[in-house]
Image (cartoon, grey):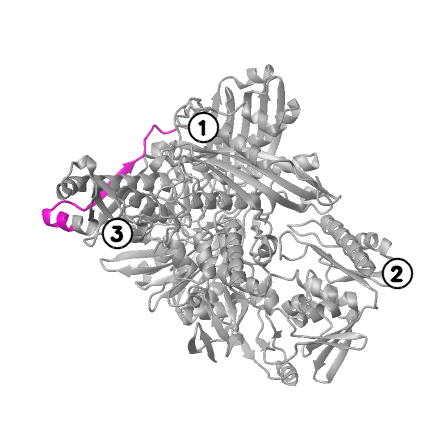
Amino acid sequence: MIPRPFDYERPGSVEEAVAVLAAAGGRDAKLIAGGQSLVPMLSLGLARPDVLVDLSRVELDGIEALGGRVRVGATTCHRTLELDPEVRSLLPLAAEAARHVGNPRVRNRGTFGGSLAHADPAAELPVVALAHGGEIVAHGPGGARRIPLGEFFLGYLETALAPDEVLVAAELERLPEGSGVGFHEEAQRADDFALACAAAVVKPDGRARVVVGGVGDRPLRFDGAPGELAAAVESAVEPEEDAFVSAAFRRRLAGVCARRALAQAREDAAA
Amino acid sequence: MSVVRDRPARLVGRALVRHDAVEKVAGRTRYAADFGLPGMLKAALKRADLPHARLLRVDTSAAEAVPGVASILTAKDVPENTVWVDVPGQTFQVGALKARANVLADGVVRYHGEPIAIVAAETEDAALAAVELIDVDYEELAVVTDPRAALEDGAPAVHEEGNLLASWQLHEGDVDAAFGGAHAVVDQSYETQFVDHAYLEPEAGVAWLDSGDVITVRAATQVIEHFRDLARILCVPDNRVRVIAPYVGGGFGGKEDMTVEPFLALVVQRTGRPVRMIWSRSESLLAREKRHPMKLRYRTACDAEGRLVAQDIVIVADGGAYALLSALVLLYATTCAQGPYACPNVRIDARVAYTNHTPASAMRGFGAMQVALGYEGQMDLLAAELGLDPLELRRRNFVERGDTLAVGQRLDTHVALPELADRVEAALGPKPAPSTPERRVGRGVACNLQPYGRCVWLNDWASAWVGFELDGTLVVRIGVPDIGGGQASSLVQVAGEVLGVDPADIVIHIGDSALTPLTGTTTATRQLYMSGNAVLQAAGELREELRPLASELLETEPDDVQFADGGVRSGGRHLPFRDLIGAAAKREVPWHRLSIFRAPGGEAWRSDASWRGRVFPDFTYGCHAVDLEVDSETGHVEVLRYVAAHDVGRAINPQSVEGQIEGAVVMGLGYALSERVVYEDGVNLTGTFAQYLIPTAVEAPEIEPIVVESGEGLGPFSARGIGEPPVGAVAPAVAGALADALGRRLTILPFTPERVAEA
Amino acid sequence: MTLELVVNGRRFREPVEPHVTLLHFLRDKAGATDVKYGCGEGVCGACTVLLDGVAVNACSVLAVQAEGARVETVAGLGENGSLHPLQQELVERGAVQCGFCTPGVVLGSLEAVRLGLAGDRPTIRRSLAGNLCRCTGYGKIVDAVEAYRDRQGHAS
């Protein structure tokens, strides 16, 4: 019902944050940004860090076009992705997917970097990031490190970030001119966790990409011809069964989400 | 401060703004958790980690060493640890010893989350830290989770006396002979699930020792009469315990049995200090009692015209680990199992079993709603068998005034079912076309009946105090807990109507077992009926007490005196209440009145199959229809439209009536489509509000409530109760619509996307 | 550590431990019991407050994260004891039953209208999806938000 006690640090810069993490030694230190996953987990006793390192005084938000990429600052909130007209033109897929994240108040406070670093396999934004491709920019004791998105998500709530690294931004590949995008999610209830979701990109050269979430321990990427991808997704994914939903049904939904996201993307490309 | 939208000629029948709504919307209402006293302790519970185990050792020493811990109590510290539930006609036949629960687990835990120890500490942090340090050694015991399996020989015993908690048997006519000569027979099983009340306000309360050594508990409850249960637990006289119910953030039956009250009272008794306990949402989902799941088997036969000739019904309910109100819930299920349909031959075998699940008890609909999935499913199946419209088949079978249910209860008041069906049909219009090719549209209808008021042999009564102040304002004192349905504000309307007082000049004091006259529980759709009649009676008697004085002062005949517009009037003369009451005070004419309303009584049902008689005061009837669209690929169901018609006799406040109907429909839709508490071998896996899926504003459809006023009902101004009735017809209407859309009937609730997609 | 913030115009300077949520701080230290605990998971919306003008679930923010912020709760809405027009609509349209979700509904709806996310009934419903209500069935809440939105339209 209420979080258990922990130590708290509020660094003023990325460098300070890295230093605090490094100084934590063997103690369990966790970064907090918007806290929309972490604070409920603290309250439910599902997370019990020794030290909480608060990034709320570190300026890491903002979206910027950098040649062939778009840099999304780590503390850019979901609501900005959802409602900002510039995001809608630069990252239409992120804008579409952000509508499905949590509820309006979660979106007001939750951050893009937080969602990627938390790496919930059912979350929407990791799916979007992987669909774009690009790199995660992390800062550690040795300075900046770039991690290709394809190598970033390692498993359930697990990423390639080291314990003393801070995710500062994601640099997402811009989609070629004339690409179409689509996003489809199936949830039992509005604003709920996805049972399955899919982001699709259809490129002008006719190639397509689909990333599915909620059906494995991390988002899963598939590239190929648009007509074949949904079937490929459905046969490849191996979701886990739980007490609420069977594996077979999640697999079926993964196929449906992929098919519908692709259809949207084709329509978008044609428009 | 009440606002009247249209200046009324009368108050009853008007959509008056509820006085409590103004305070609530401004954030001023002090709910149970919003109250505190200086220096109060914070209490928390250590709950069982396993669904069935012997407690070999409960070691609190490490917990006691936590700084700030004031007291830790286990079963041995509870003066009387057994809570009894007395069910007339059942308790002593099925076994008095079994209708009981423990305040704190004593030797054995029987469900996941059962309270084992209470910790009271200076801070919540200390209390929670101590709870985590209570060391329990368990010896795991075999778990039984299926009520049918629990009733078989050799099943693990939840209680030493056996797993049969209660049973009702009924056989009217000759069912076997009737099946032999039937034109058509349908035979189908149905299953309902565990669901949670999921009121937005988790269980909470504060308690303290007040003057006169009165242990006072201010808690979110539907039943202030639990002061007597608390006195029994504490081994103190009844008059040393007081329960106050502030405005409650939703009840739906979940705050009918005690929640935090005994734990709070025990801490006060032990420490003498004030204490607060607030359950987390996880605790509430984990261990608060649930709605009974029922396994139903219906065999139903009709003649060539579609008239029912026989129903053979078997009900097996899961009562969970302790008895609570299971026997009564099963009684409601039994009485209502035939539905609002006449049938000469009915056999019902109803049993409720103990299992190692969370105890099941009261929830809106109270057994009468689970069986609607069965009796309405049968009507749909018979209609299909005979090629009749589903509503037409129902019309041919509706009970009428003067009919007698199989249990022996004659229906004495108007039965509006034909009119309700007509109104629903007229509102529906053509069935919409699917919005995309992979979608299918279906339409379903369902009717139901639900009692209002308690079983007649409980000899129910309600008392109320109505009186003027010397300045002419009016006060109502009544023990009613207001759980959100407008229980208090409708009484203001009744009193104002009778005495001609503007609601703005009325204050109502509610929910205090020591200071307001007891009026019984806010349960069983009884408050408007019972409290409403008590206030009607008290206000009416007060009016007659004052009438002679008024006639004297107005210099007119008593019969010419009208109570209206804040005073008494005759012809062109008007005397404000201030003047009338001033005169009454000087002349020693009483200007307040305490009255008791008594519901008609009756003889208790003995559990043998030959008993026949009246069970309930009366019923409220309903007819619902739903259009929905199914995505055949994903199983996603979108409710397009919902029409719900009920005869409420007389709508005291039409807006409140609509609110009850709309809220119940959405609760019913959650029951039909998404809500379930999931267990695995007795372990409750539904620990968060993200997992327990009550409908949001998106899933909730636009609802068209149809309020029919037949002018017949047992409540004040001929009102019928409407709190529970609208929840029952929803799931069967959805089942019918899904069958219409999919061509196949789903019979196991809830109809989740997965089940729909695979149908 | 010491936390400084402003709640409904009142300045607070209070010692607070880092693990205390904004919800518990507001209720236990700032007397703002109009902010309700419904789930503690960011799901039900009963603890909605405006944090520097933005609607958040107070259960999902640590009090220390609100350092220096301006917090508004439903009790701070009306002026001179009168109700805000949206509150008035909710009351008159019968959108308040048990009332426990109501403070969150008020603040959530206000933000939706302000952001232009209350254009039609389905959009209002989407904007309200994070405010669970178990009593009303939502229809009368949507009525009230629609009416308030229209009033705003006329006012501007």
- Identify the chain of the residue marked 3, using the numbered disc in the image: B
How far is disc 2 from disc 1 in space, using C-alphas? 67 Å
Q: Is residue A131 visible?
A: yes
Amino acid, disc 2? Gly
Residue B367 percent coordinates (x, y): 48, 37
Residue that extends furthest to the left in the rendered view of this protein: B587
Q: Chain of mark 2?
A: A
**The N terminus of chain B appears in which quarter of the rendering?**
bottom left
Chain of the residue under the numbered disc 1 shown in the image: B
- How far is mark 1 from mark 3, CA to CA? 40 Å
Residue of label 1: B415
Residue at mark 2 to residue at mark 3: CA–CA distance:
79 Å
Which region of the structure is painted magenta?
B582-605
Q: Residues within 10 Å of mark 2 (few under 14, many from 20)?
A: few
- Marks 1 and 3: which is nearer the front? 1
Q: Disc 2 marks which residue?
A: A206
